[in-house]
Amino acid sequence: MTILLSTLNARYTHASLGLRYLLANMGPLKEETRIQEFVIGAKTTDVVEKLLSYEPKVIGFGVYIWNVDETTKVVAMLKRVAPHVTVVLGGPEVSFEPGEQSIVQLADYLVTGWGDVTFPKLCGEIISGPKPLMKIHAGMQPPLPEITMPYALYSDEDIAHRTLYVEASRGCPFKCEFCLSSLDKTAWPFPLDAFLAEMESLHARGARLFKFVDRTFNLNIKTSLKIMQFFLDKLEANPDDPVYAHFELVPDHLPEALKETIAKFPPGALQFEIGIQSFNPEVQALVSRRQDNAKAADNIRWLCTQSHAHLHVDLIAGLPGEDVASFARGFDQLVALKPHEIQFGILKRLRGTPIIRHTEGFGMVFDAYAPYTILATRLIDFRTMQRLVRFARYWDLVANSGRFANTIEHMLGAAPFENFMAFSDWIYTKTDATHRIALERLAKLVAEWLQVTGMGKAEANALLASDYAGRIDVPAEKQAAAVVAPMRQARHLAA
């Protein structure tokens, strides 16, 4: 094996789309190239031993915010035990500010940005000569029709056990300063017929979970409708073997034609990720986010009441100009719309994003280490930010898990943010932990909190029992019968 493509995925269920793109576009070197994926948390020596077992001449690593620390250790060990192996880096984490990163100093070469064309070219020069003198190579962006699609490289095991990432377009026309896509000039579509032919092939091989990574799936409505019709046709033809598709939507762009199509999907077949991030117009202006809040709210309300789509809506705490009171108002507004999940995110300073321009003016302090989470701002001090971090974690455990659907409504009451923050502060004093809280213990703590806030013990246990979550006075057969989401959707959400 001459060239090895590798990365450390966040979970086994994630299959690297980036590595498969590189392999698909290796040209004459494709037969000498293979993929070897790992999962973060793997022992560094085991990773290095496995990589070297292929006796590669070149190893290319995909480096992301979630794996940069562990990949740095892998590269450092590789250069110690096998200095003859050429290490090439690529990926969003190392494409910006490379001079500050120890992993770049350790590696032999770096490809920044798009690697579909530049990485194969670089490998050819490394192997056949003359070896490049420059360490950093800016990725060339070819027209999308010239890029070979990678979907045939998903293995049968990938199809059976992993989420399949697909993209009908690359790029984004919006300029939200916390997102790397703000650096794109626009969105570029892949040829639609060719893309749908690839989806047809995947489906024929047994693929049923499709996660679109397009930043703006509903930007071009004609394209969106054709892609959604593809899935509707599959659902109609195979109602007992349904597909499941995940799309990221622009929240304030949902014309009637798209609504009509969305309304046709049955339960458990469709998930939308919708980035609200903030409902504060002043904050939106500061981070160059264009959003019609009233229209976005109307669309979320429509999706919740008139469709079977599962809604995952994002808010970000720590944006410049937003204090806790402003965030709380946005959170309460979103809770009132009743999406299935609210992803409470904490701002991260992705390398290369323009959000850094607000650092001094808004007193923004970021962690120096990945994932570069915001620690404090002029409006939110460090201690308060940590309370928000804990709120986000407990919100995932209690609200987003779907295990406490009836109980959470009572817990939130008329002041959702205030009430859940009180619960968050209380449970932290009881556990001194935000992870490794067993479900049964969590349910008992929730029941105890209900009693602390005035509910009787029997009533609290009955409320918990109605969710089949805490095993409190619930027969085993009823616990086993509890279904939070349709099976295929639940499998996707677990990924």
Image (cartoon, rainbow, N blue to C red):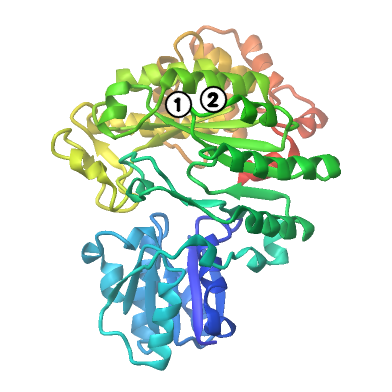
Residue type at tag 2: Leu
Disc number at residue 51?
none
Task: Give me the residue at 60% from left, 39% from top.
Answer: 222
Q: Is residue 350 above or below residue 460?
A: below
Is residue 147 among the parts visible in the rendering? yes
**Percent of width and height locating residue 463:** 65, 15
**Percent of width and height locating residue 400:** 56, 31
Task: Give me the residue at 64% from left, 38% from top.
Answer: 225
Are circles 2 and 1 on residues that touch, CB within 8 Å? Answer: yes
Residue placed most toward the observer, 443 or 318: 318
Is residue 448 among the parts visible in the rendering? no
Residue for badge 2? 445
Q: Is residue 239 above or below residue 303?
A: below
Indicate left or right for 427 with 228 as reference. left
**Percent of width and height locating residue 380:** 24, 28
Residue placed most toward the observer, 197 or 478: 197
Task: Give me the residue at 21% from left, 33% from top.
Answer: 377
Which structural element holds mark 1? helix
Q: Residues within 10 Å of mark 2 (few under 14, many from 20)?
A: some
**Percent of width and height locating residue 386:** 32, 33
